[in-house]
């Protein structure tokens, strides 16, 4: 149930977002969660680390579910996502932030690539209109 104006705003934002915007939102969430997980490890707050690294894994599972296998890159992205899940699990089990830091770097690069592709696609669409 949506109670606050902020929750209503978020719901509207999700319902009106383009597929590219939704993808970027997923990346933003994963980046935020992995950073919080890393902070939990560094603070030795392992409950916090576990919570946020698991949330990161859930977002990556959503990214995997969104893959369109009509395009050859989907198989490559699936392998990258699988590797990130492996590293997050490793980070969480060993309470070592290095694997999570590695995942963070991949998420940041992928988010930037998707953002660039989205802007390029929008620019081309505007030029054709």
Image (cartoon, rainbow, N blue to C red):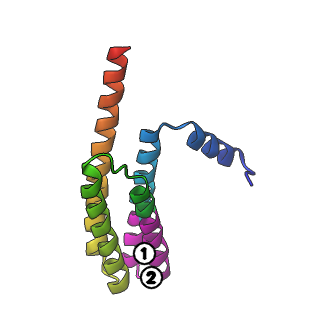
Quadrant location of the C terminus? Answer: top left
For the magenta stretch, what is the residue range?
Answer: 34-58
Instruction: Tell me which residue sits at (31%, 70%) in the image.
Output: 100
Dividing the picture into quadrants, the one containing residue 118 is top left
Q: Is residue 62 magenta?
A: no
The label number, if any, that marks residue 26 in the structure image: none
Which secondary structure lies at badge 1?
Answer: helix
Q: Position of residue 27 (x, y in %)?
A: 40, 53
Image vertical order of residue 118 relative to residue 14, above or below: above
Which secondary structure lies at badge 2?
Answer: helix
The answer to whether residue 113 is left or right of residue 1 is: left
Image vertical order of residue 44 relative to residue 24, above or below: below
* Nearer to the camera, 14 or 129: 129
Local packing at callout 2 (Cα closer than 10 Å; few below 14, some 14-19, many 20+) is some
Q: Is residue 54 magenta?
A: yes
Instruction: Tell me which residue sits at (46%, 48%) in the image.
Output: 25
Q: Position of residue 1 (x, y in %)?
A: 74, 55
The answer to whether residue 50 is left or right of residue 72 is: right
Q: Which residue is mark 1?
A: 40
The label number, if any, that marks residue 46 in the structure image: 2
Dividing the picture into quadrants, the one containing residue 87 is bottom left
């Amino acid at each position: 149930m949506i109670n606050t104006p902020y929750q209503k705003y978020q719901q509207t934002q999700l319902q009106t977002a383009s597929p590219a915007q939704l993808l970027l939102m997923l990346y933003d969430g994963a980046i935020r969660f992995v950073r919080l997980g890393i902070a939990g490890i560094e603070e030795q707050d392992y409950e916090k680390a576990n919570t946020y690294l698991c949330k990161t894994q859930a977002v990556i599972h959503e990214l995997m579910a969104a893959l369109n296998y009509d395009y050859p890159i989907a198989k490559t992205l699936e392998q990258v996502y699988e590797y990130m899940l492996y590293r997050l699990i490793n980070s969480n089990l060993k309470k070592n932030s290095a694997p999570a830091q590695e995942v963070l770097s991949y998420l940041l690069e992928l988010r930037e690539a998707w953002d660039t592709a989205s802007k390029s696609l929008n620019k081309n669409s505007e030029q054709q209109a």
